[in-house]
Image: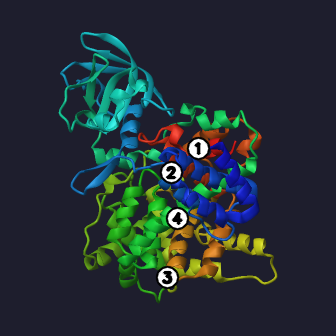
Amino acid sequence: MILIIDFITFLFRCGGITNCENLINGISILPYSGEQISILKIHFWAKRIVIENKSYADNFCTPYYRELVRRYCGVKEDGVLEYGAEGKKIKEQLVKCIWSEQLFKKDKLYTEDGLRMEVISSGLWNMEEGPDFKDAEILLEGKGVVKGDIEIHVCSGDWVRHGHSKQKEYEGVCLHVFMWNDRKNKYIKLKNRLIPQLELYNYLEYKLDKLADMIDIENYPHTGSANAGPCQKRLSTISLDDKWIGYFLDYAGDERILIKAGRLGRRLSTQTFEQVLYEAIMESLGYKNNKEQFKHLGTIVSVNDIKRLIPSDVSIKERSRKIQALLFGMSGLLPSQISRYTSAKDKYSLEYISDVEQIWSVIKNDIENKPMDGELWSFKYSRPGNYPTRRIAAISRLLAENFETGVFRIILKSFEKIDGNKSGTDQIKAIIRNTESIFLELYDEYWSHYYTFGGKRLKNKGRLIGKERSSVIFINIVIPVLLAYARKMNDMVLEERLFKAYKLHSKLSPNNVTRFMNYRILGKDTQKRNVVNTARRQQGLLQIFKDFCESDDIACKRCVLLLSINAIV
């Protein structure tokens, strides 16, 4: 097999990519196992990056990462199960978060075989192969303190489906935790031991749909849980150009954007680009605590509803206030709808509240959908600048300022406008600046000075959307939506500009997952960590985490990054 690998490398240098691909595609006639053939194919793609010493995604987002993962690593989507009347889906990652944070009634727990139990320690979040939590401690009726590992699943039957009884790594499990007991077994048998089981659903602190809204699973595990992955350990023992790591992250980052573009593009069968963009921006403004609430608000008050109900022949200030009245009224957040606000005392608040309440009293008769319950919105876990009231004011101002043309067309124009006096790179940087300024330069006569209705007035006028959130919207919303548009319209010029903007955009502020992955893959080596110097590469970290590190079905030894590293050394 080593001879074949050497021959592929030689052929690559002499004959180019096509000859290598032909050899790889016909290699199944050789006496190698499927796993060996997969390794050869991964070796080819990995060598391709090293030998050329460049990223193959020069002009457009590439599917190379996707091909590696889907063909050779056997990645499947996490196990999900629908719950509730709306048929929402729950991922195993959510169950892990609930266990880690102990968001259940800790003083009322009983195992499936009827034993009273308490959780002393939920354990350490494990990112290696094996059980999900290590070194946990539970107090079990009749047995005292029991120490061991915890395995988490959506359904009890996943233990059998994943084959854990036959895996040595799971011999230390002391408790099996799941959301639902679909097999109705009281315990599992493991090496002549009876392992107790806990069905969490009956003991949840809140309803499952509320927990799903409260918890941002992408922010777990916490950075402190990060262990050095096998990829980091392997990189520490070999001499590999840091550029290779960067290019690999580029590939993974491309895949993340392609997935988002595909997801948004599928909505276009029933919605306009303007509506798709509007809903995506709304969801992004919700952060983790109000994402679902903003998403719902965007569906019950569509762009067409706003166009129909709000006059165009008024000032931007008046138009913005009317949109605010509509959105606040439909969100259930007006002072007349909810008791969370103290009575306004200052003249600015009294005047503003009176105005929007009066507008709402008229406009509410012309909209079919029912307003939301204002109590569903979360203020508790948000910074004041991120309060839903402030964000609703922001989207209202954005729509008011771009009412005639539409936000989508305004953003599209920013990518079409080119300054002939600037170099290619400077032009792309100008596009990024101009597009982000559409979100960054939003101010409001009232909400730039307040966080809530009738709250304390701020001395200085503040932006409704900050620099960091504007950049997040650019990467996570603008690029994917416009990419879906470019591909539908076969606009290669726009797609190339989008890709160049994606390549050039500086990295965003780190979140828990990017911090975790930075350490897990690159360790404390400053030079290696500096490889993650763009938003594109941060997105690559997030994609690898989603595909491998958080997956219960994919062990590290089948991770495309580790396989690629091993294939080229």
**Which residue has dot 3 on it?**
403
Colour convention of the picture: rainbow
Q: Say which of marks 4 and 2 sits in front.
A: 2
x and y, in percent, of residue 515 in the image: 61, 42
* Side of 492 relative to 163 (left or right): right
Looking at the rendered structure, the secondary structure element under dot 1 is: helix
> What amino acid type is highlighted by mark number 1?
Leu
Looking at the rendered structure, the secondary structure element under dot 4 is: helix
> What amino acid type is highlighted by mark number 3?
Phe
Mark 4–mark 2 Cα distance, whole angstroms, equals 19 Å
Q: Say which of marks 2 and 3 sits in front.
A: 2
The C terminus lies in which quarter of the figure?
top right
Mark 3–mark 1 Cα distance, whole angstroms, equals 51 Å
Q: Earlier in the sequence, mark 4 or mark 2?
A: 2
Above or below residue 68? Residue 149 is: above
Taking the image as drawn, is residue 347 in sight?
no
Residue found 55% across the figure and 42% down from its top: 512
Crowding around mark 1 (Cα neighbors within 10 Å: few <14, some 14 to 19, many 20+) is many
Q: Quadrant of residue 123?
A: top left
x and y, in percent, of residue 199 in the image: 25, 32
Rendered image: mark on residue 563: 1
Q: Say which of marks 3 and 1 sits in front.
A: 1
**Contact check, label 2 and label 1, Cβ < 8 Å:** yes
**Which residue has dot 4 on it?**
258
